[in-house]
Image (spheres, rainbow, N blue to C red):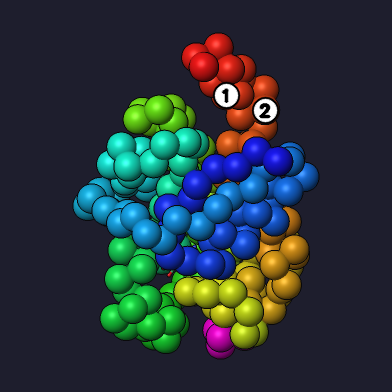
Amino acid sequence: MIEFDFVTGNQFKIDEANSALAQYGIQVRKRDDIEKIEIQSTDLETIASAALALVVQKVKGKVVVEDSGLFVHALNGFPGPYSSFVFDTLGIDSILKLLDGAKTRKAEFRSSVAYGEEGKLVAVFSSVTEGNIVTQPRGSNGFGFDPIFAPIWTQKTFAEMEMKEKSVYSHRSKAFSKLALWYLNEGSKKAKIKS
Ligand code: IMP
């Protein structure tokens, strides 16, 4: 089994990454002993790359960080890169209130996964899942804005899905799948040539 260290304190992110990566013979190991520093930017790839550039100095092997956010169309992409802060300070009801009377409830989750090894940032993979903000929170699984987001292909919110089902749709699992395909086709060869 190929192993990457994943610098995060969020067990849901770990489980989701592992659910996506298992079919490729890759797994991530939680590293919550290292701090992930988030710079301010509106671009998740920039945030993930900057965080990776710092953690890759402290980890010996292959390492990943992920940055994600909920971008609500009627709110011009808010909370976007500030999703974690908005969730912690105002909660999911704040988004429902802001959308009261809005013409569209369209939204998207975005995820950017940065990968590095040997002290360097090597690659970044991003993905988007489009959906809608439902009118009332539904479901008790998952984390963050899961109870108010339903991907466009289903009425179910992420919080009404088991991990395996969320993995079919999620921004994070798609970004990690891109990483896995790249690693198996290109990344691992580069690593072998280097070592
Ligand atoms: P960060 O990636 O640690 O900066 O956190 C992004 C924030 O966006 C999380 O704290 C959640 O509030 C929200 N978020 C990102 N991905 C998801 C998801 O898959 N489900 C629910 N909320 C998410």
Q: Nearer the viewer, residue 172 or 64?
A: 64
Mark 2 Cα within 10 Å, few/some/many (few <14, many 20+)?
some
The residue sitting at 69% across, 79% down in the picture is 160
Q: Nearer the viewer, residue 59 or 27?
A: 59
In which image quadrant can residue 140 be found?
bottom right
Residue 3 position within the rendered picture, expressed as x and y whole percent measured from the top left: 60, 42
The residue sitting at 62% across, 62% down in the picture is 15
Please say if 171 is above or below 82.
above
Residue 24 position within the rendered picture, expressed as x and y whole percent measured from the top left: 74, 39
Q: Find residue 160 and name its label.
A: none
The amino acid type found where label 2 is placed reads Leu
Q: CA distance from mark 2 to mark 1?
A: 6 Å
Q: Find residue 187 and name its label.
A: 1
The residue sitting at 73% across, 72% down in the picture is 162
**Magenta residues: mostly which secondary structure?**
loop
Q: Is residue 96 magenta?
A: no
Q: Secondary structure at mark 2?
A: helix
